[in-house]
Amino acid sequence: MFDNQRYITRGVAAEIPPEQIALMWAIIDVRLLANPKLDYLQVFQLDYANELPHVQIITHTQEKPRYKNEIRASVAKTVCARVYVIDDGTYSTMMLSSDY
């Protein structure tokens, strides 16, 4: 899973800065190296803390097997969004939850 063609929706391209998009794909790639059995649905919750300017909080989860990890990254622009990455076997698509 997630080793095929990768796409993003227009919503992701419009709302998520390119460095955060690349970071989410990199997080998936690192997980693949550690555990090649990923759920077909990866969820990223992007948040920020007002007291920490330019710090993006990324909470990465999946259902089966249960997984949750929080990452903090220094970025130029923070966003709040829920992003799904779905692998259907042919390709992987990154989309906003509102695109789903």
Image (spheres, grey):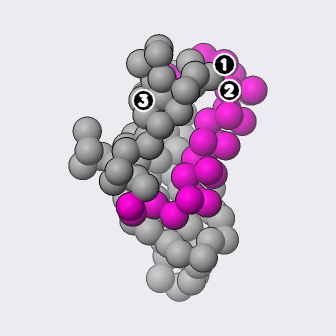
Query: Is residue 82 visible to the viewer in this orientation of the structure?
Result: no
Q: Position of residue 84 (x, y in %)?
A: 40, 40
Q: What residue is shown with label 3?
A: 86
Asked whether residue 27 is drawn in magenta, I would say yes
Q: Position of residue 60 (x, y in %)?
A: 52, 44
Whole-percent x, y for residue 59 in the image: 51, 51
Label 2 or label 3, whichever lies nearer to me, is 3
Which dot marks residue 36? 1
Q: Which span is picked out in magenta? A: 14-40
Residue 24 at x, y percent in the picture = 58, 47
In depth, the one of 83 and 64 nearer the eye is 83
Query: Relative to residue 43, is residue 30 drawn left or right?
Result: right
**Local SS, label 1:** loop
**CB within 8 Å, label 2 to label 1:** yes
Kindly state the secondary structure of the residue where label 3 is placed: strand
Task: Name the residue at 55% across, 52% down.
Answer: 21
Give the SS element for disc 2.
helix
Residue receiving disc 2: 32
Q: Is residue 89 above or below residue 57?
A: above
Q: Amino acid at mark 2?
A: Leu
